[in-house]
Image (tube, rainbow, N blue to C red):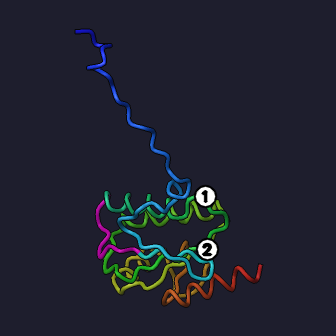
Amino acid sequence: MNCLSPAFRIHWPRAVIRSPTRNMAQPPFKHLKIQVEQNVLVLTVTLPEITSEGTTEDLRLELLAAVGSQENPKVVVDFQPVRYISTTCLRALLSFRRRLREKGGQLLLCNLSTQVAEVLFTTRMVSATSSANIPFAMAPDVATAVAHLSSAASER
């Protein structure tokens, strides 16, 4: 039997045409919940602990993807659900901060548990007073952080 005979006819599936809006949808995030308040991107970390290299790298990639190609992003990272971080998490936060600064953005950390704050204070990543030598600024909660970044945007 000849492979070109009608019995061996190949049926190719039609090309699937996707809507442009479907391709531009937010990627699903495993470790972040995302919302926008007053033009400020609020990224809530959903992990109770950030201790392993793998989790840290996943979080770093998700933080970077959440901002995407935005210029001058105003971002709050909410640590409400997080009870503990190891110093490996600092690499992800510093990488994210560096990318935001390259884009002209601003970053505030908020809702730090006692243990998370202790790691950040001990490593001099945050301070109770503002300092040019301290990489991260912090706020007590999301509302305060959003208000601060919103007012900073309107003053420009």
Q: Is residue 75 above or below residue 66?
A: below
Q: Residue drawn at (62%, 86%), measured in percent from left and top?
A: 148
Q: Position of residue 156 (x, y in %)?
A: 77, 78
Q: Earlier in the sequence, mark 1 or mark 2?
A: 1
Instruction: Tell me which segment is drawn in magenta.
Output: 45-53
Question: Tag on residue 74?
Answer: 2
Question: Tag on residue 55?
Answer: none
Q: Is residue 68 left or right of residue 3?
A: right
Tag 1 near tag 2, CB within 8 Å? no
Q: Is residue 122 left or right of residue 65?
A: left
Q: Residue drawn at (49%, 90%), measured in percent from left and top?
A: 140
Q: Residue drawn at (40%, 70%), measured in percent from left and top?
A: 32
Find the residue positioned furthest to the top.
2
Query: Mark 2 packing: few (<14 Cα in 10 Å), some, or many (20+)?
Result: many
Q: Position of residue 122 (x, y in %)?
A: 41, 78
Residue 12 located within the stretch drawn in magenta: no
Mark 2 is on which residue type? Lys
Mark 1 or 2, closer to the camera: 1
Q: Which residue is mark 1?
A: 69
Q: Is residue 34 left or right of residue 104?
A: left
Q: Position of residue 149 (x, y in %)?
A: 63, 81
Q: Position of residue 109 (x, y in %)?
A: 50, 79
Q: Tell me how far mark 1 sits from mark 2, CA to CA.
A: 13 Å
Circle 1 SS class: loop
Mark 1 is on which residue type? Ser
Q: For this rendering, which residue is in front, 132 or 13?
A: 13
Q: Residue drawn at (33%, 82%), measured in percent from left and top?
A: 115
Q: Is residue 105 above or below residue 114?
A: above
